[in-house]
Image (cartoon, rainbow, N blue to C red):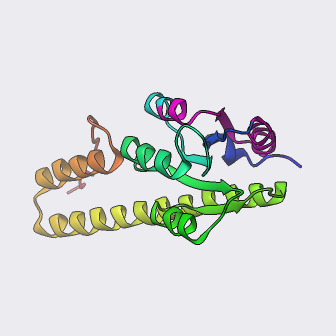
Amino acid sequence: KEPNSDNKLTKLLVVDDEEIILNIAADVLENEGYQVKTESNPLKALEMVKKEKFDFVLTDINMPEMNGLEMVKKIQEIDADIGTIFMTGYANLETAKEAIQTGAYDYIMKPFELNELRAAVTKAVEKRRQQVAKSDVGKLNRLSDLVEVLYTVGDKASLLKLSLGLALVNSGLSTGFISCWEKKSGN
């Protein structure tokens, strides 16, 4: 089966103190086309997140240096947009509740089936795409409404300046330009 080409845009960080889990997860997810980095030490994983942008972190909950729940809270202070999928062999109601409170996309029980891992990541990536698409549509609708108001007022200079400013803010850019022309009438 060919990996989904959209997956290669998704960067995953897998954190687990068990080397076998790191290797299995990396193999399975790389075969699905994801960019995967692994780390067995949660403190080193935090350093990686400071230096590199990841879309999701898949982490064990029970690890020696720092548990996965604590690590994810610290990761979210560094990058609030990173998604989380927890993997654990020691599930209980408290850790499940805490995982949900951190905004986890999923919670996988070890030992897991490879299809469970694939499905959890696929579902999380798709959910993230839908959230981003809804957010972008909302921003475009607000921009469109504002442009319509300015257009009816008839102030073209303000309309252009505001349109450029809003486009820059909504796209996260600092500079840009607008090119326009006016159709000359033959009269």
**Whether residue 67 is visible:** yes
Q: Nearer the viewer, residue 132 or 137?
A: 132
Q: With 107 as the anchor, is 28 left or right in this view?
A: right
Q: Where is residue 186 in the image (x, y as percent from the top left)?
A: 25, 54
Image quadrant in which the C terminus is located: bottom left
> Is residue 181 at all visible to an observer of this figure?
no
Q: Residue at 55% of width from left, 48% of height from top?
A: 68
Quadrant for residue 15, please give it: top right
Residue 186 drawn in magenta: no
Q: Position of residue 61 (x, y in %)?
A: 60, 52
Q: Which residue is drawn at 83% across and 54% down?
A: 114
What residue appears at the point 76 percent right and 39 percent down from the top-left corner?
30
Q: Give the range drawn in magenta.
A: 19-46
112 above or below 2?
A: below
Q: Does the magenta stretch include residue 31?
A: yes
Q: Main secondary structure of the magenta part?
A: helix
Q: Position of residue 9 (x, y in %)?
A: 62, 41
What residue occupies the far right of the structure in this picture? 1
Q: How many labels, in total?
A: 0
The residue shown at (29%, 41%) is: 179
Quarter of the image holding residue 63? top right
The residue lying toward the viewer, choosing from 90 and 101, is 90
Left or right of 66? Residue 157 is left
